Amino acid sequence: MAAGVDSGLGELATINSHTLPTGYQLFDTYEIRAVLQLGVASVRYAATAGDVPVVVEEYFPARLARRRDGVSVGPESARAADEFEAGLSAFLATSRTLAGLRDDSIACMHHWVDANGTGYAVSEAVTGETLGARLEREGTLPDDELRELMQPLIRGLGNAHMIGVLHRQINPEAIVIRPDGTPVLRNFGIGAKVVGGARQAFEAHTGNLAEIAPGYAALEQYSPGGREGPWTDIYALGAVMYRSTTGLTPADAPFRAAGGDLTPAAHAGDGRDIEMLAAIDAGMAVPIASRPQSLLAWHGMLFRGAPQTLLASRAARTSARGFGRAASVGPGQIPVARQIAVSRQVARIAVRQGPEDANVGLRALRWAVPALAATGMIAVITWVDTGILRGNADVPSGVPAPHGYGPVRRNEQADVLRSGGTGPTMVMLPPGRIRLGCFGPDCSNPDAPGRLVVFKRAFALSKYEVTDLDYARFAAATGRPPPGVVAAGARRPVVNVSWHDAVAYAEWLSEETGREYRVPSEAEWEYAARAGGDSGTRSDHAVPLRVGAPAGVGVANAWGFHDMLGNVSEWVFDCGGTVQTPAPEDGTAWVQEGCERRVRRHGLWDGSSPADPTALRTSSDPDRGDPDTGFRVAFLAD
């Protein structure tokens, strides 16, 4: 058999008492030929029905079950009986539901039955090459080829969601590309979830680690208290697309939730479709509330402008409505000791095997060990926010931003644009007070005491400077010159824009979203830059004046804002002329009639090192655009 080609039969192997013997006739119809996968909750076999290859999955939870006579299966002890039976009921319920699913992009479920004290599901053996094998050989896929693969998979998965089934194991090895180039999603089975069925009861006792694929599993899958839904499969498909576009295996969700780094797909650049890359990042957001909630919504982000006919059915529109909500309590602690016991059980299986059989056990450990380690981390670390796992109600309304430059926080959102896509990522700031480091046109001494400002209302400010891609939509709609670097997909702060351009962009954004956006005031900008402190913190990635780094490359401050003290300077609404009236004490902009100059705020990009870097400012001609000047947008809380 050619390397990298998956016929559905896998490597021939004889395991031990945990598996059916090779040659065994199941129902006098299916002959067991080989073990494909020895998992924690089930065993998959290559089998034949006459001359037709099939895949047989047997419910066999390693921790709960034992094989008494080489064939029949039962609970290992009386204490395990309830959990074993609950899992068996869930397995059969899932198989029965999947048997009614017919789609060319989903491996067909032929038969399900309970026998030998356990349950079996017989499905199509898909012939072709796994996406994982192709990516190992080619590294990445071109955008057009990736779109051709994803369109039918999203349609088929939407049909599964319509009948209440989540896949929960999507990864490059679960996708097979037939010789004619069409994709098939396989490995529905014990990992799949029929919402509201016995599977949930089973998971309440045992956890749901058996089917986790590290790097492709959403954070909620690591906890029995996690609320799963279409957004869970969206995360996994997004991770597959991330691997296909960047050539990198995604970092595990618990690692990302702990603040671990993940290079966004949007940084792939090099002529790739930046809208698609942004949608991939949106699909891979760690918090549930920050992901698209249905395949239809995500499809619109991935294939903007593409026909929606493939997803016009009720299947694709399935979202949170059919998948319920988590209980109001926080997620329970994951039974780490129990999962370690499962790990040891699988390890013992591998040790008992002969040299030729060890690979099967190792394949099981390849997935089990990282998952168990990640789960231990979640159980031990106390910072996990229930909102990440369950979709906390404190998350503001609006579709999460697709930029994905860093971890998405609960106080972030992005509004949907009427013309398609989303606006800038916005961070909500709480009411508070600061004493401005400098105010007015004469700030030759930025360390002089400033005016006390009290913010009585919460307001939002964009997390990053408005990017070239954000501005490009506005430019196309209004006939303004487009930013020069959009085609490269660099997602740099837009520059060479005048103060009037910035104000016009905010007005356009207001029309697109129905929310009143504007250019922020000096006080608002400084309040965000200080992030609750007395002064700003220098960015470790401040860049030279005329370079301009990709948005988000600088270190975020305590409130999550990037590049306020590095990258480009930023327009604010305030006048830069002679102060003739007292500065506002409520944080609004200082303006006067006939204002001829407007203020630009900036940090340390010019090489200066004042005691309070957040106070640096200058004023400029509002009609002039410079290669070192961009802007942010703001709005008041409702």
Image (cartoon, helix red, strand yellow):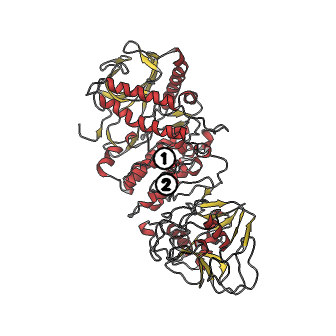
Q: Quadrant of the N terminus?
A: top left
Which residue occupies the foreground of this view, 183 or 198? 198
Is residue 212 positioned above or below 237 on the image? above
Q: Counting other residues with Cα less than 10 Å from the Cα at mark 2, is it few (<14), some (14-19), or many (20 or more)? A: many
Give the residue number, with chain letter if any, for mark 1: 255
Q: What is the three-letter code of the residue carrying label 1?
A: Phe
Residue 621 percent coordinates (x, y): 59, 85
- Whether residue 180 is visible, yes or no, is yes
Q: Can you see residue 308? A: no
The residue at 28%/41% (across/down) is: 4
Q: Please state the total of marks drawn on the protein image.
A: 2
Residue 277: give x, y in percent of width and height: 46, 57
The residue nearer to you, when weighing 583 against 164, is 583
Q: Position of residue 332 (x, y in %)?
A: 60, 35
Q: Which mark is residue 281?
A: 2
- At horizontal 66% and vertical 37% (from top left) the residue drawn is 329
Disc 2 from disc 1: Cα separation: 16 Å
Observer-nearest residue: 450 or 148? 450
User: Relative to residue 196, is residue 352 drawn left or right?
Assistant: left
Q: Would you say 30 lies left or right of 484 here? A: left
Q: Position of residue 136 (x, y in %)?
A: 31, 47
Q: Secondary structure at mark 1?
A: helix
Image quarter hosting the C terminus: bottom right
